Amino acid sequence: MRVAADDPLADDVRALLEEHLADMRRISPPESVHALDPVALAAPGVLFLAARDDDGALLGCGALKRLSEEEGELKSMRTSAAARGRGVASAVLAAVVAAARARGLRRISLETGSESFFDPAVRLYLRHGFTPCGPFADYTDDPHSRYLTLAL
């Protein structure tokens, strides 16, 4: 598996991101869906990474959105259904954290849902050193959101 910068507008990536957005819209109320669409992930200030196998098949993705000179936000973590359980999310997360460090960021934070659907993701983040925190950036207290952060 190789994790590297990729194009969120590529057809295979767009399909995975649309699946991600559909799940978020199905699980959370509209005002609590904070996932970015492919166009927003292609914007300046966002580093989009994808994990691919040796044949180039998309396994998963994640992004780093710069919030300030010192803080970034983890966005759009998603593993394809066929690749789940193979360490893709851990590899993408490690690459995003490494990219944040390389950019001189001192903190990376994330918002995820509070429904049980999101429990595996929260366990992943906690295993990688993230800790619960309050809302950051433009987020507010929301019973449908959980916030986590990692000092770099």
Image: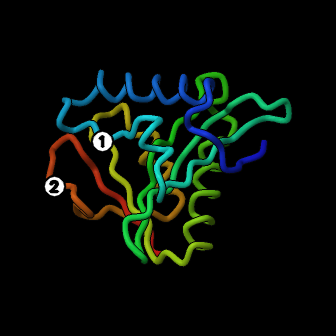
Nearer to me, 12 or 83:
12
Q: Sort mark 2 into few (<14), some (14-19) or many (20+) by Cα contacts within 10 Å.
A: few
Measured along the vertical axis of the image, is residue 76 above or below residue 117?
below
- Seen in the image, is 138 located left or right of residue 8? left
Q: Which residue is the extreme one toward the front?
A: 44
Q: Is residue 127 left or right of residue 1?
A: left
- x, y percentage for residue 11? 61, 24
Decide: few, some or many residues near mark 1? Use Cα within 10 Å; few <14, some 14-19, many ≥20: some
Instruction: Give the CA separation, mark 2 to mark 1.
Output: 12 Å
**Residue identifier under label 2:** 140
Identify the secondary structure beneath mark 1: loop
Q: Earlier in the sequence, mark 2 or mark 1?
A: 1
Residue 70 in percent (x, y) is at 42, 77
Image x and y of residue 85, in percent: 64, 33
Residue drawn at x 62%, y 66% as measured from the top left: 98
Identified at 60% across, 27% down, the residue is 80
The residue at which mark 1 appears reads as 34
Q: Amino acid at mark 2?
A: Thr
Residue found at the very far right of the displayed protein:
54
The relative height of residue 97 versus residue 106 in the rendered view (above or below) is above
Q: Residue at x 65, y 22 (%)?
A: 82
Q: Does 23 sit left or right of 57 as displayed?
A: left
* Image x and y of residue 117, in percent: 37, 31
Q: Are marks 2 and 1 in contact (CB under 8 Å)?
A: no
Quadrant where the image shows the N terminus: top right
Task: Using the rendered view, name the quadrant where residue 67 is placed.
Answer: bottom left
**What amino acid is found at the position of numbered circle 1 in the picture?**
His
Q: Relative to residue 97, is residue 58 depicted above or below? A: above
Question: Residue at the location (66% across, 29% down)?
Answer: 83
Helix or strand or loop: what does disc 2 sit on?
Answer: loop
